Amino acid sequence: MSSWSIKRRYALLVVIATLASAATTLTLSALSNPPAAAGAPRGPAPVGIVSAFGPEQAAILAEMHVTRHVDIDGYRYWIGTLAGSPVVDLASGEVDETAELGTYILDTRFHPRAVLFSGTAGAQNAAVHVGDVVVSGFVVDKSSIHYYLGGYQGSYIGEQVPVTPKTDLRGALVTGYGNPLPTPADAHSYGEGPSKLDKHWVEVSAFAAPHQLVELATGASSLIGTNTIADATGDSKRSGEITNQVIAGVVGQADVWTEPLPWIEDQNMLYPTDAEENEGSGFAFANAQLGVPWLLVRGISDSVWYPNAYDGVVSSDHAAIVVKYLIEHLPATISKAPETLAELSPLANAAQAGYLLADKAYFKVSAASKVVYTDTAGKTVTLKGSALHRLAHEYTYGAGSIG
């Protein structure tokens, strides 16, 4: 073989090795920094908008100039602009878990500069009315409750957040830390686990939104206008109007719709909230864990102080007005300084109570007096008297009959 052929073959091998190295580098880079979803907006980072269900999302889509959509793992993300700014919009579905997953996908695939939840909620504050908007200075998980034998309730452990360098828990109410998890090396002797704490697992009872977003949202109060007293009370005979307002308060998430005022009183003495909904903790969790600025914007659709009042359209429209205002006035860089208890609206229950979470809230529970259920044949069955007593007997101390 001639020396020219050897040199040419050597040069070819160098080129192949160089290309292979570059391909490996690109592959590793792609694995550690996954690309934005196909069809994601180019240029400035978008603002993410999440809603739970149809009427909430419709109010946003009606304001958007939609250019396309991307479907990811069952979720549809609408891409376009709102008030001239790039946005990605999602209806996540109702309830905490689906909102958390949809938000996580939005954050990791579209890399938004902020995410806003535009939706509805029920009033948990007598001064908050249908058509008002509550923005989340804080969000709490009202289903995280430990009912103690001493006749009081306290917070359970809150949301367990695995902390990374990106995680932003500034202003959060941290109530504890997890314990180190087992490894293959200590699994056989792990038992109940070590008593020391692992501060990479943070237990959060309240997430704090960025104060800048909360304060900016309250500037939209004059834009949401009025509502009729008939609509706000559910009484068609009432006349007149009320002026709606934007309130910086505490949003409580729980997969429970509570109507009896004594029960709301018990819940609010533990977690003094102003609005109740189904998705807030998961939404806040996903954003905080990934370090993305966030805010819940909740139009008030109903009030237990007026049991016949409900307006999902007005509340959705008012939330969308505030979201549009936020996007129009959103600064290029969002400060992550958190909301504080002192900065909440004076009307907020937590501001009046002076706390976000009580240590103990005492309550009373009575036995169930009647149960109605549907059997496998579709027949409605009512249990009361002796039939109910047979089931209720189990719930007495010593019924386990051990020893």
Image: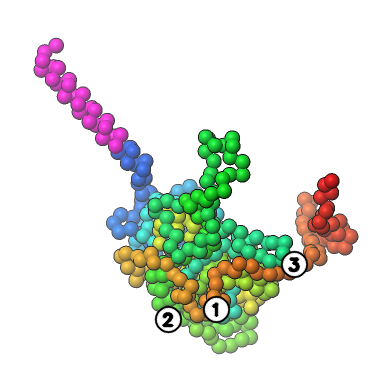
Query: Could you tell me which residue is drawn at 52 percent across and 54 percent down?
Result: 177
Say what secondary structure mark 3 lies in.
loop
Residue position marked by numbered label 3 in the rendering: 365
Say what secondary structure mark 2 lies in.
helix
Residue position marked by numbered label 1 in the rendering: 352
Badge 2 or badge 1: first in the primary sequence: 2
Query: Could you tell me which residue is drawn at 39 percent across and 52 percent down?
Result: 165
Spatial CA span between label 2 and label 1 = 24 Å
Query: Could you tell me which residue is drawn at 29 percent across and 37 percent down?
Result: 25
Q: Quadrant of residue 32?
A: top left
Q: Do callouts 1 and 3 mark residues in contact (Cβ within 8 Å)?
A: no
Q: Nearer the viewer, residue 362 or 134?
A: 362
Residue 270 visible in the snapshot: yes
Display colour scheme: rainbow
- Give the percent coordinates (x, y) of residue 375: 78, 53
Q: Looking at the picture, does residue 179 appear above or below residue 250?
A: above
Badge 1 or badge 3: first in the primary sequence: 1
Q: Which numbered mark, 3 or 2, is in the foreground of this view? A: 3
Query: Could you tell me which residue is drawn at 77 percent across and 50 percent down?
Result: 376
Q: Residues within 10 Å of mark 3 (few under 14, many from 20)?
A: few
The kind of residue tagged 1 is Gln
Q: Looking at the picture, does residue 176 appear above or below residue 246?
A: above
The kind of residue tagged 3 is Val
Quarter of the image that includes the N terminus = top left
- Give the percent coordinates (x, y) of residue 225: 46, 81
Spatial CA span between label 3 and label 2 = 43 Å
Q: Which residues are magenta?
A: 1-25
Q: Residues within 10 Å of mark 2 (few under 14, many from 20)?
A: few
Badge 3 or badge 2: first in the primary sequence: 2
- Give the percent coordinates (x, y) of residue 265: 65, 73
Q: Looking at the rendered structure, which numbered label has been put on residue 222? A: 2
